[in-house]
Structures are given as structure tokens and as C-alpha cells.
Amino acid sequence: MALNFEEIAAHPALRACIQAQARAMQQAYEGNPRASAVFATQQRWLMAHIGLALHFRRDPGDYRKELTAARFVDVTVQHAVASRNTAHAFIKEMQHYNFIEVGPAGDDGRIRPLQLPAVMTLEPLIGWIHIHLSTLDALDGAKRLETFQARPQMLAKLQPLIADGLISSGPVREPQQTFSLFTWLNNGGVVMDWLIAGVDPENAGQERIPTGVLSIGDFARWLKLSRTHLSRKLRDAEALGSVGWLGRRGHSVMWISNEFYGEYVTAQAVKLAIIDAAFAASVKHATD
């Protein structure tokens, strides 16, 4: 049975599990920063999930169920994820970097479906799912990851259900203030993962929680971000009282507020509940 948001949020092991998850996400970024760039902002992350869901649900025999630019844009706008112009620009960028390509025309020559190139790998998506299933397993001792690895064909059912849950969730589309501040920054999710990965869960009850960040310059270089741009976002977060420095700014240990930490943990609990509900439905579908 899937864990719901309340059960996840109240779990005594959640903070330690979230730290382990943040570290795993860091490692995934280091292993494939180019693929991670697709999910560089919250908006791009959601659009990528929309595109993948349409890919898995496509039916080459029915043009109405093909993955096309028009269908992608319609779904993106319908769920208020992005404007039409932004959605079209995202498609063009994905084509430019060979994440998608135009497929052969069907019976109706006016419709050109989009498809994943033959060389395109879904390993980053699978790795992302592995990380979150591992977190859920750590909370209740179940064997979701083992089940998924034994049934790789589940991916085609699981990912669209995860996408449905994400794009229909108000808390996902409209996160709390500091979390929202970083979601609009390129690699903003990675920034937050890095901050949380350096937090000792035993310090999580403090008003100012020390992180592992000691230098803005080193932080920016690791993230492949402009130091100026990152500094500006950090100053915005400082103005909200969400981050600060234990000593001289930019040259001492950075802290995050207890409120910001709580926003991050809540956002992860929302996401984990969506993934677990999708996983339970996928398993049920596979056994029916």
C-alpha cells in the first residue's frame, strides 16, 4: 500500500532519508550534467515529464495519440506549466541537443510526430526513479526498487502516472516562497540538493542550520553557474531570512533557515507521495 503525504511527512526517519536522497541526486548530476540540464528549472523539469509521458502513451497507429509538438504544447498550457511560446522554445531546444527528433510522417503527411532518437538513453530517468524508490523503501522497508528492477517494462506505465501526479499538484507547480525562488534558477534543484546534502539531520531543529557550503565561488564552479547570478539569488534568499553566513559572507559556512529546510522536506514528501501512488498503481496494473 502506498505511503501518503501525511505518513511520509511525519516519518521519524524522513530527514535522514532526504539527506541520503539529496546526496544521490548530487552524484547523478556529477555523472551526467548535460542530461541534468534538461531539468535545470522546475518549469523545464515538468515539461520534460510531460514530453516523456506523451512518448510512453503514444500510439503510432492513431495520429490522435502521437507525440506531436501541438499535443505537447496543449498539455503544457492546459496545466499552466508554461506559455505556448515557452513550450515551443523548449521543443526546439530539445531538438537542437538531439534529445528528440522529428519522426517519419504517417498517413496524414501534415502531422510530423516527435520521437526519441535511437541513440537516446532513458538512463537518467531510470536513475531518478531508482533514487526516489530507494528513499521510499528506506522509510518503510518495502522492496519497490527491487520490484522495479525485476520488471523494467513498468517504466512505460509508471512515468506517465508520475507525470500526471506532478502536473496536477498545486504544491508542485506553486511551491513555497524560498523553494520557489530557487526553482527558477538554472540548476536550482541541484543548488538545493547540495545545500541539504551538507546538513546534519541532527542539526535540523536549529533555527540556523549549518550546510557544507564554504565558498560561493567554489559552489558556482561546481554547478557551472555564473557566480554573479548565483550570488544574486542567494542575496534574494538572504533577504527572506532563508540563508546566511556564520562568519564573513561568502567565505564561511553557509546556513539555511529552519523554515527553508522545512519547505524542502515538505516538497520532497509531496513528490515522494506522488511517486509512491504511481508505483502502486503500476504494480496493480502489471498484476491484473
Image (cartoon, helix red, strand yellow):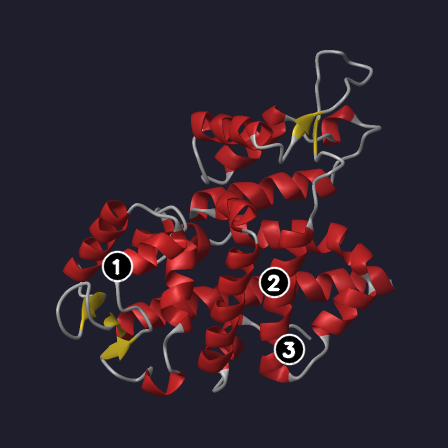
Classify mark 1: helix, strand or loop.
Answer: helix
**Place of residue 239 in the rendered image (x, y in percent of width and height, measured from the top left):** 15, 59
Horizontal side, residue 222 vs residue 153: left or right: left
Name the quarter where the C terminus is drawn.
Answer: bottom right
Secondary structure at numbered mark 2: helix
Q: Disc 3 and disc 1: Cα gap in Å?
A: 35 Å
Give percent across and percent down for residue 272.
55, 67
* Residue 10 seen by the camera: no
Q: Which residue is mark 1?
A: 216
Q: Which residue is mark 2?
A: 275
Amino acid beneath label 1:
Ile
Hey, what amino acid is under mark 2?
Ile
Q: Quadrant of the N terminus?
A: bottom right
Which-is-in-front pick, marks 1 and 2?
1
Q: Which residue is mark 3?
A: 137
Q: Earlier in the sequence, mark 2 or mark 3?
A: 3
In which quadrant of the rendered view does residue 143 lie? bottom right
Q: Quadrant of residue 56?
A: top right
Side of 101 relative to 258 (left or right): right
User: Which residue is drawn at the image coordinates 68% and 53% (left, top)?
Assistant: 123
